Image (spheres, rainbow, N blue to C red):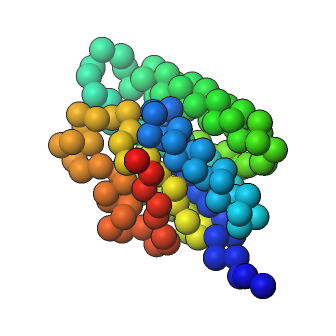
């Protein structure tokens, strides 16, 4: 009998192509390990340009996050997998780490590139930071 090392799998989603690949890979692993699946969207609080005031900007980002979680949930449910969804606000890596701890996740599955290509290039990618600092295993999907 095999032990289940991955009881809870966290998949941070952002609607990007790589994020969608990570979501599909997570479905495969959920089936193999009979894991619980948690989908997370983090609304980054930094306002890139002062075109909108902060409140309007965050409202747009939250709407996009909810839509992204809805689409991801739809993909998962088509495969007869149930999931929990979480929307957070703040620094992406910090919020992912907090959810890993609060939900006792054993694995994070993340795409190697997200939507914020320019910012990630300057600040270092989310996947790279998670690989270095996450409190559990990380699978980076290309």
Query: Which residue is at 46% across, 64% downward?
Result: 138
Residue appearing at x 51%, y 56% in the figure: 109
**Residue 4 shown left or right of residue 136 in the figure:** right
Residue 103 in view of the camera:
no
In this rendering, the answer to whether 142 lies above or below 130 is above
The N terminus is located in which quarter?
bottom right
Relative placement, left or right, of 108 versus 28 is left
**Residue 81 spot, x, y in % from top left:** 77, 48
Report x, y in % for residue 99.
56, 59
117 or 104: nearer the eye?
A: 117
> On the rendered structure, is 100 left or right of 3?
left
Residue at the spot x=49%, y=22% of the render?
A: 60
Question: Is 55 left or right of 6, judged from the image as shown?
Answer: left
Given residues 36 and 40, the one toward you in this image is 36
The image quadrant that residue 41 belongs to is top right
- Image quadrant assignment for residue 102: bottom right
**In front of the other: 81 or 98:** 81
Q: How many marks?
A: 0
Q: Which residue lies furthest to the right in this view?
A: 80
Residue 78: x percent and y percent? 77, 36
Q: Which residue lies furthest to the bottom in this view?
A: 1
Q: Residue at x 31, y 57 (%)?
A: 128
| Residue located farthest toward the left when viewing the structure as drawn | 122
Look at the picture and state if 128 lies above or below 16. Answer: below
- Measuring from the top left, give residue 29's x and y in whole percent: 64, 59
Whether residue 42 is visible to the viewer of this picture, yes or no, is yes
């Amino acid at each position: 009998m095999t032990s289940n090392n991955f009881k809870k799998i966290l998949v941070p989603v952002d609607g990007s192509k790589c994020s969608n690949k990570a979501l599909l890979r997570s479905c495969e692993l959920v089936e193999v390990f009979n894991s619980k699946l948690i989908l997370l969207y983090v609304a980054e609080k930094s306002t890139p340009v002062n075109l909108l005031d902060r409140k309007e900007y965050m409202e747009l980002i939250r709407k996009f996050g909810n839509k992204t979680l809805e689409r991801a949930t739809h993909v998962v449910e088509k495969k007869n997998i149930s999931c929990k969804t979480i929307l957070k606000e703040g620094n992406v890596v910090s919020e992912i780490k907090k959810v890993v701890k609060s939900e006792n996740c054993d694995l994070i599955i993340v795409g190697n590139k997200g939507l914020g290509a320019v910012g990630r290039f300057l600040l270092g990618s989310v996947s790279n930071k998670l690989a270095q600092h996450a409190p559990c295993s990380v699978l980076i999907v290309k």
